Amino acid sequence: MNCEEATKLMDGYLDGELDPITSQTIEQHLRDCPNCDQAYKTHGSLIRVIGNAAPYYKAPAELRERIRSSLREEMVARPMRNVGRDVQPLFPRRQPGPRAVLFGTPWNWLSFGGLGLAAAIIFAAIIAVNLVPRWQRPAADQFLATQLIASHVRSLMANHLTDVASSDQHTVKPWLDAKLDFAPPVVDLASEGFPLIGGRLDYLDNHAVAALIYQRRKHFINLFVWPAAPDATRTPKIIKRQGYQLLHWVDSDFDYWAVSDVNVNDLQTFKEQFAAQTSHH
Amino acid sequence: MAAPLKIDYAFNAEDLVSSAKIVKFTILKKHQEPDAVQEHEVASFEETMLPHMDAAHNLAKWLLRNEEDAQDVVQEAYLRAFKSFGGFHGSNGRAWLLTIVRNTSYTLLKKNRAVDLTTTFDEEIHTAGHESVSPATILEHSENAELIKEAMDELPAEFREILVLRHLEGLSYKEIADIAQIPPGTVMSRLSRARAELKEYLAARISKDK
């Protein structure tokens, strides 16, 4: 083996990826050639150093939560037997919202001609941008209700009711506080007939939220909690959907959504008891 | 945090999309058997794939050099992996997932019209007079994490990728060939070029700083 060949095979040898016979030939050459031997030693040291010095970017906790919840959403939204039938477009988040609406209009774009077309697009875009909040909000709220029910259903079927199973509010609360950027109120309502089962992190509306799980006889109530927006609607609201009750209310700090299949009266009682207990804290 | 909820009109009318979704819930609840299969499938997927999230994020971050893009790509890759998990019968979950992460990253890089996929970096670096920098000096500086990161970030994507797979994931040439979709015989020469470029960048930086 000559120096040129030895140099060519240097990386493979140092990575331990050559066959034994070639490796032996190289070793023989290195014994005979101090120049190559030195080059191998230096390169070997560099190779070892790169792995130690280069930063390793671990996945942040928020990404873990995001992926777990998107997988569960995927599971509920599309049964496995439909897999592959409708593959989502790549990077859907980057698609501008109003576009589908714009191109869905019955106008004949071709009739506008070059400049007219450009002007029309800009004009339509301005209108769209102004209208978007009004269009999107009902859709967003519909989506939230769907998400809430989906999350409730998932928590019951995927064996993932609680991340921290405890009837002790003093166990559940610190656990949630440590994982969220807000401190949700946690109370046990066992004496009122709604024992606390535990807490869970969930991901709704693009934010990590707290889910508290209470039991009512054989039924479960998922109470989703996150900080209230300043202009949130103050009036409590009951929504019935497909056998589930969603009760929404807001106090000075938080937005609450209770989701369950218990009857409306039970859910109202639950809300009153919860509100009464938390106001003492 | 959460968007303000204007629920007054939100639930008055059932739109087609959400009722379609609700219908699906109903189906899920009625057919217990597929549920069980599905649940098992999900559990198996999570068990096989979630442990490799650090590797997935690491590769995406190095390729895209941007945290937000990296997270989007990893999430997208997990969804894709989940959808095609039925076709995965291998034993190497990490390599399989990294292949998807890699392809998804390249799609985004191309979409953003990144020109650095195969091109070599700044010519100035190559023409700079740094032949005088000794291998020992380069080695000494290569322990500087900040400098190594900077140097690797300057390399074309195909070099960043191969250095990450080899040095940070410790993958074999065979695994690297599978992930990067190149012939196994090409791995050594590409790795060799990547390391040479890295060395050259370090030498150029060192001689510039002198």
Image (tube, rainbow, N blue to C red):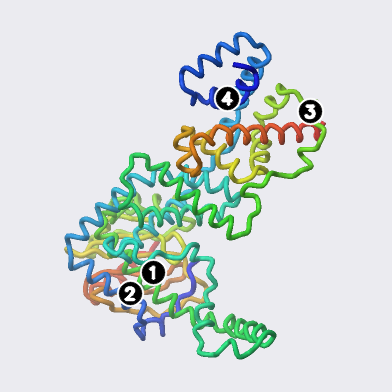
Q: What element carries label 2?
A: strand
* Residue corresponding to mark 1: A256
Determine the CA span between mark 2 and mark 1. Answer: 8 Å
Q: Which of marks 2 and 4 is nearer the N terminus?
A: 4
Determine the CA span between mark 3 and mark 2. Answer: 73 Å
Q: What residue type is labelled 3?
A: Glu
Q: Is mark 1 on a helix, strand or loop?
A: strand
Q: Quadrant of residue B174?
A: top left
| In this view, A227 is above or below B176 | below
Q: How many marks?
A: 4
Q: Do the residues labelled 2 and 1 touch (CB within 8 Å)?
A: yes
* Residue corresponding to mark 2: A247
| In this view, A121 is above or below A172 | below
Determine the CA span between mark 4 and mark 1. Answer: 65 Å
Front of the two marks 3 and 4:
4
* Residue corresponding to mark 3: B131
Question: Is residue A222 in sight in this rendering?
Answer: no
Q: Quadrant of residue B137?
A: top right
Task: State whether discs 1 and 3 lie on one chain.
Answer: no
Question: Is residue A130 in sight in this rendering?
Answer: yes
Q: What residue type is labelled 4?
A: Leu
Q: Name the chain letter of the residue that bears numbered label 3.
A: B
Q: Name the chain letter of the residue that bears numbered label 1.
A: A
Front of the two marks 2 and 4:
4
Q: Name the chain letter of the residue that bears numbered label 4.
A: A
- Residue located 76% across and 35% down the image: B205
Q: What residue type is labelled 2?
A: Leu
* Residue corresponding to mark 4: A9
Q: What residue type is labelled 1?
A: Tyr
Residue A271 location (% of width, % of height) = 31, 71
Determine the CA span between mark 1 and mark 3. Answer: 67 Å
Determine the CA span between mark 3 and mark 4. Answer: 23 Å
